[in-house]
Image (cartoon, helix red, strand yellow):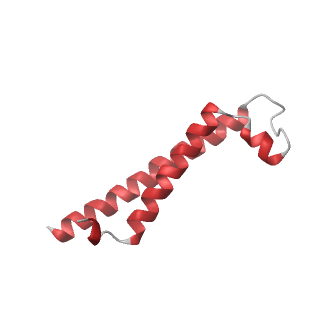
Amino acid sequence: MFGSMRRRFWAESVSAVSVAVLALVTVIWPDWIEIVTGSAPDGGSGAVERAVVGVLAATAILLAAVARAEWRRAVVAAG
């Protein structure tokens, strides 16, 4: 079964997990954005961090849905 999966499925799956982990890291440790960029774009209010979590979570859900569709395509094709 896994041998019939296209690279697209694996890229989408790994990307979804990576983005979800990054969203979780942002929830747990929101200051990483200021540390990496060297600035506080929101003045320390946390608004940017919440926006980043929202975008990352939406992206992870979208990538997971696309990977699931690819999985179902492979199951139907193998069936």
- Which residue is farthest top? 45
Horizontal side of residue 40 vs 79, given as left or right: right
Q: Quadrant of residue 39?
A: top right
Q: Residue furthest front?
A: 3
Quarter assignment of residue 48: top right
Decide if residue 18 is on the left or right side of residue 69.
Answer: right
Residue visible at 19% across and 65% down in the picture: 76
Q: How many marks?
A: 0
Q: Identify whether 57 is placed above or below 18.
A: above
- What x and y, as percent, mark residue 54? 58, 40
Residue located 38% across and 58% down the image: 67
Which percent across, then down, holds residue 62?
46, 52
Name the residue rendered at 53%, 43% in the picture: 57
45 to 4, vertically: above or below: above
Q: Position of residue 22 (x, y in %)?
A: 59, 45
In the shown orientation, is residue 65 left or right of residue 31? Answer: left
Which of the pair 15/41 is nearer the observer? 15
Percent of width and height locating residue 47: 72, 33
Q: Name the image quarter holding the C terminus.
A: bottom left
Q: Quadrant of the N terminus?
A: bottom left
